[in-house]
Each structure stands twice: as structure tokens, then as C-alpha cells.
Image (cartoon, rainbow, N blue to C red):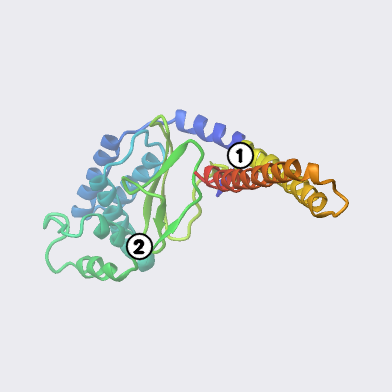
Amino acid sequence: MPCDDQAVLILLARALADCATSSGDVQLTIEDAEAAFSGLDVVAFRAATARVNADVKCLRDIAPRPLAARLHRLEGLRYWLDGDAKRSHASFAAALSIEPGYTFPAALIPAGHPVLAEYQASASLSASTLSVPTPRAATFWFDGRLDAGRSTERATLAQLVATEGDVRASALLWPGEPLFPYDVAKPVRKGPNLPLTVGAGVSLAASAVFLGLAAANHDTFEDPATPTGQLTGLANTTNAYYFSGIGAGVLAVGAGAGAVIAGHW
């Protein structure tokens, strides 16, 4: 579940530092599990799949997509053996989405084996995805691919990768299962550009003052009591105030529009 608690991240980092596996290590353990399955050694198979799950949580690199597919196939076999069709299909569907043309080697799954029908039946699961909250200074990789959404009906290998490239957390997740704790990026609040907003306000105020002065001068110009000798000067002053007010108004509109545009880019 996403959280903002830095202490959680510190604990995760310490836990990851206590164990370290690579994609190569995981692949070797998967090979052991597959060999046990083909040899009908159920005890060894379960032990190997348990090691795989433990290794995945300690992954220190981004798992390649073929490895993610192989991991999901192994999980599908594990839950097929347990009689858990829901999880088996969720895993097989994830593997098929990554490698749709894959066929099991006959040494692992011989022709006519009932698991083959279950594998193909899993293709009917939806390919829909769900966006997850953006992590702070990190990205999410699902099944070896940078992605902002996780599958809603398929299993997934989720990895949280820091901006610097370090893997912070890894986990095999089932549909609906919460993500591991991580720090969510705070949304950037955008609004009108402050300097342009202030400029627009000042220009608008100036426009109002100039137009007010123009109106006052115009009233004086129209007053019959105004001496004739003052009319020319009043006309010139009125026009100057009027056009200054219009100019300031245009500047206010332009600055206001610029504030909105600049604040959303």
C-alpha cells in the first residue's frame, strides 16, 4: 500500500541489503524446480518454488521479460499442482501475455498432459490494467517492462526501481493484492504564474484609473461652465487618458492570459 512514511522506505532498504539475488540466480533455481517437476519429485519441486519466491523478493536487478514469463509458468505449475485453478490461470495468463508463442518442452510437459489445457484456457483472462500512484523518485516495472499500470486479472512481477537504477523492492503479486509500501510522489500544484498575475492586476488597476480620469475630463469638457480656452487642453488630456486606459487594459488581458498559460506548462 502506498505511503509517505520515510521510515518504511528505510526498513525496506535495510531488508533488501540483507539479501541479494540476481536474475541469473532466480533462473538457476527455476531450472531446479522444472527438473524436479519433470522428474515427478513433488517435494523437491515445492522446495525449489519456495526458494524462487524468496529470491524474487531479494532481486537487485530488473528481471528480463523472458525470465518473468518463465517465473509465471513455474507459479502456474505450482498452483495447478495445488488444485488452485484461480491462481494457476492468473500465472499462466501472465506468461502467455509476455510470450504468446511459447510451448512447453516435451521433457517438462509431455503432449496430452492436462496442464496444457489449463495453460491455454488462461488466455481468456482480461488484459485490462489499473494505474498505480506514481512513486517518488522511482518508477514501476511490471514483468520486466517500465509501466504505470498493473494487470487486474493476471499475476505480475512488480519491481520498484529508483531513478538512479537501484531496485528498491520486488514481489510476485496476485490480482488485487496490495503493492509493497512505497513513497508516493506529491502532485505538483500548478496555478497562474505569480509575476504575470501581479502584472495583470497592476495593469488592470492602471486602466481603471486612466479611464476614470478620461471620464472626469470628458464631463468637464461637456460642462457649459468650462471656459472655452480650456477645451482644447481638456480634449487632448481626455484622449491621452482614454488611450492610456485602453493600452493598460490590453496589457492586463495579455498578462492574465500569459499567467494562466505559463502556470500550466
The percent position of residue 222, horizontal first and vertical second, equals 80, 54
Element carrying mark 2: helix
User: Which label belongs to residue 90?
Assistant: 2
**55 up-or-down from 151: above or below:** above
**How crowded is the residue under tag 1: few (<14 C-alpha within 10 Å), some, or many (20+)?**
many
Task: Give the image quarter of residue 194.
Answer: top right
Residue at the far right in the pictured view = 225
Residue at label 1? 196
User: Which label belongs to residue 154?
Assistant: none
**132 up-or-down from 80: above or below:** above
Q: Nearer the viewer, residue 181 or 251?
A: 251
The percent position of residue 261, horizontal first and vertical second, equals 52, 46
Q: CA distance from mark 1 to mark 2?
A: 54 Å
Observer able to see residue 190: no
Of labels 1 and 2, earlier in sequence is 2
Element carrying mark 1: helix
Q: Is residue 184 left or right of residue 57?
A: right
**Foreground mark, 1 or 2?**
1
Disc 2 marks a residue whose amino acid type is Ala
Residue at the far front in the pictured view = 228
**How crowded is the residue under tag 2: few (<14 C-alpha within 10 Å), some, or many (20+)?**
many
The percent position of residue 181, horizontal first and vertical second, equals 54, 44
**Residue at position x 52%, y 35% from top?**
12
Q: Is residue 30 left or right of residue 86?
A: left
Disc 1 marks a residue whose amino acid type is Leu
